[in-house]
Image (cartoon, rainbow, N blue to C red):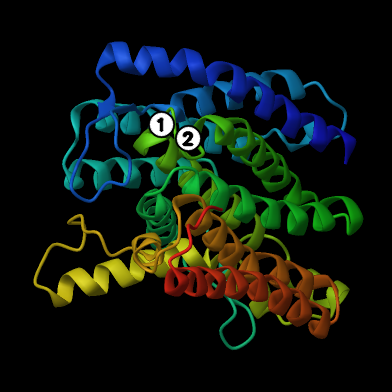
Amino acid sequence: MREYLLTLLLAAIITFLLTPLVRNLAMKSGAYVGIRDRDIHTSITPRWGGVAMWSAMSLTFIIVNHLPLVGKSFGREAQGIFLAGTFIMILGMLDDRFDLDSITKFAGQAVAAGILLLHGVQILWLPINGILTLPANIGQLLTVLFVMTVINAVNFIDGLDGLATGVVAICASAFFAFSYVLAVVNGFSRAGAPSLITAVVIGMCLGFLPHNFHPARIFMGDSGAMLLGLLLAASAITLTGQIDVNAISDSSSRSAYLPLLLPFTILAIPLLDLIMAIVRRLRAGRSPFASDRQHLHHRLLDLGNSHRRTTFILYLWAATFAYPTVIAAFAPLWIALLVAAGIASLSVILIADTVRKMRKGSPIHV
């Protein structure tokens, strides 16, 4: 655990130190966003937060590559994840600066998924009639679709200062907990790469959050959102789509369905927001990727919640799904349900407090 904590701290510190430099570079390069009707921010804010994250990830990999335990996680898959992340970050940089069209971005996301496939990061099985080994072409198609879905889910939820950064950190910490127990406690070597990647993701998010929390001095932009989405997707595939599911089920007395459901429950809030947005826009006869002001965070703001309170509520919602799912993999189900109920109750208390203050006309802070 000490090596993973060191990895996390390195990624956090380097991200924190590099972000102001990248912020100045973004402003000088014109990579900033003005004020649009759907936006919450009230001043011009630079993008390219993903550049600081990617730089920190690269430097962290170089440093921890020599550690005894974490160094074993570097291999073909980790290399593929890094290369795909580099490609998607560059694509995001271009989009942050020049506002690329949707087709170009989708094509680039598919190419990034293809890089993962070339390095062996691929969904290999599904729990259908036991364990169904997928034909190579079906597994490749599902891999590309899953990677693109997670990338756009993270991108969609990036609408409030610190929201996507915090939600991704929560998701990554849940993935890390699951993969760490498998890799270190249960001895599944295939869980080493996702443990490394998710530790770095947590660090990048924690290092970036002080600059990105309300009021944000820099946005992660598509360079950050797509990078984080790809890293989460790749970790999920490497962790849950390729390991020996029968061994997991035997050792933890859990159904083989849990490893498949894990990515979707942990990423429940970003995926839910994505699905709701697509359905809403299609029903209105609009493009599913046309912007609007009806995301989950917009609706919470319209209830009267402050910017920060809305962010905290969505953090709690993400944690309500993420942490109990991991707990259920290794502990009695009642403990997982109790944790879920406790976290969900906190969000209910915050919303109820907002409604009460709105009725009284009292100011709402955090």
Q: How many labels, in total?
A: 2
Residue at (83% x, 79% y) in the render = 335
Residue at (81% x, 36% y) in the render = 5
Work out which quarter of the rendered image holds the N terminus and state it: top right
Residue 121 seen in the current view: no
Side of 218 where 67 appears, left or right: right
**How would you rate the neighbour count of disc 1 (Cα within 10 Å): few for under 14, some for 14-19, many for 20 or more?**
many
Number of the label disc, if any, that sits on residue 231 = none
Q: Secondary structure at mark 1?
A: helix
Side of 24 where 208 appears, left or right: right
User: Disc 1 marks which residue?
Assistant: 89
Number of the label disc, if any, that sits on residue 85 = 2
Among the 4 quarters of the image, the one containing residue 148: bottom left
Percent from the top left, x then y, of residue 252?
85, 74
Are the residues tagged 2 and 1 within 8 Å (C-beta)? yes
Q: Nearer the viewer, residue 182 or 171?
A: 171
Residue at (50% x, 23% y) in the render = 52
Q: What is the three-letter code of the residue carrying label 2?
A: Gly
Q: What is the three-letter code of the residue carrying label 1?
A: Met
Percent from the top left, x then y, of residue 224?
44, 36
Q: Nearer the viewer, residue 179 or 21?
A: 21
Residue 55 seen in the current view: yes
Percent from the top left, x then y, of residue 361?
43, 66
